[in-house]
Amino acid sequence: METIMSSSFIGYLVANIEKSGRNPKRVMLGFIAAWVMFASILWVFPRPEGLSANGMAVLAVVVWASIMWVSEAMPVGITGISVPTLLILTHGIPWVEKKGKLVPPMNIVFSGFTKHVVWLCLFAFLVGAIMQLLKLDRRIALAILDKIKASNVCRVIWGMFFVNIILAFLIPAANARAATLLPVVKGITGLLGDSPEEREAKKAIVIQSLVYGTMICGVFIMTAHLPNLIMVGLFADNGFTGLGYLDWALLQFPYLGMFVLTQWWVQYHFKTSGIEIAGGHAKIQAQHKALGKMSIAEWTLIVLFCVIALLFMMGKGSPIYELHKYQLGIIGLVGILMIFTPGLFPFSWKEVENKTIWGTFLLLGGAITMTAAMTKSGLAQWLADAVHGAVVGMPWWGVILTLMLGTHVIRIGMLSNVAAIAMLAPVVFSMAPALGLHPVSFTLLVCDTDTFAYLLPTQITAAVIAYGSDEFSVTDYAKAGWACILIAIAYGILIMAPWYAMLGIPVWNANVPWPF
């Protein structure tokens, strides 16, 4: 009887997991493995020399979260909010004495949810939600494609790149932009026929527009890619403050040029040169005109966003004009106050709430907390010392190349770029002093290459969304992606490293004064 009940309960769990759209085997094995490793690190494995008891506890939490994120055993946001919980239960961050009693250091374990970059992100999420409800995102995409008279594959791809740049200012998180653009891209690929050449063209349009373009533009705008915010928070916690919205854009601006190289490769690989889209521009123009004139609500959102964007750009140290000294997150909260002025938009809170990606918001807060815990517990430094032996004595470019290649190997099994950077950034940052490298430029160079994990669609959420278009196979993606990974690595070393040096943070010199 017990066996039958046990079997029935397992069947019940499997059925529910399948209904949620996940793989039951992967989820169950991941869930069990996460807790087994968590318990083993805490109570079974001997503590390595040089790692504190707090660091060992944080390591257990990091491994637990990594397995959960990779296997998708729990929603990513729930895993994110669970990180502070486990840090409290394991004493990963030492408890503090208050009135003669030991109490959890709540201000530290939940610090990821109080950083100003998190509230900046929430503002961007809410603007993105209202924008989607107004269908302003679709209007922007069609307007740009109409303006450039997109009639062949090359023009469409370049048009979608400019769409990505505009939306990067308005919609945070690459996965949100990819989901926004998917129906537009599907509409364009639907205009192509079914010849071998046109099928290849469809692959090129989807991969370049929804994956490469989305990720490259995301690196450029601080709020457009959540790993950017994790790194900004890490830098600020370690004394590298004052990195504003415009400063970040200036630092990362040359990455936009990488799209030229990926476009050249994709055009060559899929042989899309000269392929016309039958009636392409006329149909895009018709879809654009069908939207009608812009509504008052659309204009209101654009004006409000421009006002907040100016406040972002005119903060402390602004090269334009220093209007205020508030952090970006405070301005983001001011923006939230403004956009919810009664009567500005014809939507209920429930509608806005349903379009806001709360899971990603929780993931970001948990990831920032985990990054801080790794640093404060000494785990990041211990891991950095362990890796240091493998790269010591190499020239600066050799160290970066080795870590870039190692990062891409590690990323083969990880879906979340945010989770990967939460673990990678504090380790890389801690390595820099021992290697005589600048911690900020060194961390940027290594961690930015993680964004361009283009070998498997399962490595980036935006690629998973693109894969859902059914226009390309995993093999198609890998054949195009390996070369783009090499392009990204070479671009970082040959273009970005000299650029950072020109801006005052040469990776080969850790002693230069912080220019921001």
Image: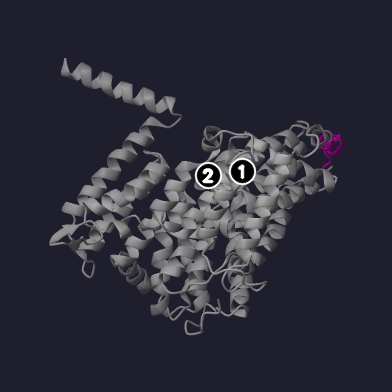
Identify the residue at horizontal 80%, vertical 48% (top origin): 155
Identify the residue at horizontal 36%, vertical 47% (top origin): 81
Q: Where's residue 512, x and y in %? A: 51, 84
Amino acid type, residue under disc 2 in the picture: Thr
Label 2: which secondary element = helix
Residue 422 appears in which quarter of the rendering? bottom left
Disc 2 to disc 1: CB gap under 8 Å: yes
Q: Where's residue 241, x and y in %? A: 48, 72
Left or right: 71 in relation to 40: right
Bounds of the magenta segment: 274-285
Left or right: 177 in relation to 260: left
Residue 423 in view: yes
Residue 20 in the image: above or below residue 379: above
Label 1: which secondary element = helix
Toward the left, the furthest residue is 100
In magenta stretch: residue 293: no
Residue 102 in the image: above or below residue 413: below
Q: Where's residue 11, x and y in %? A: 31, 21
Q: CA distance from mark 2 to mark 1?
A: 9 Å
Q: Is residue 168 or residue 436 the one in the foreground?
A: 168
Q: Is residue 345 or residue 392 the one in the foreground?
A: 345
Figure disc tally: 2
The residue that mark 2 highlights is 461
Quadrant of the drawing holding the N terminus: top left
Q: Is residue 74 or residue 473 the one in the foreground?
A: 74
The residue that mark 1 highlights is 178
Whichever of labels 2 and 1 marks the residue nearer the N terminus, that label is 1
Counting other residues with Cα less than 10 Å from the Cα at mark 2, is it few (<14), some (14-19), or many (20 or more)? many
Identify the residue at horizontal 55%, vertical 59% (top origin): 331
Find residue 85 and name its label.
none
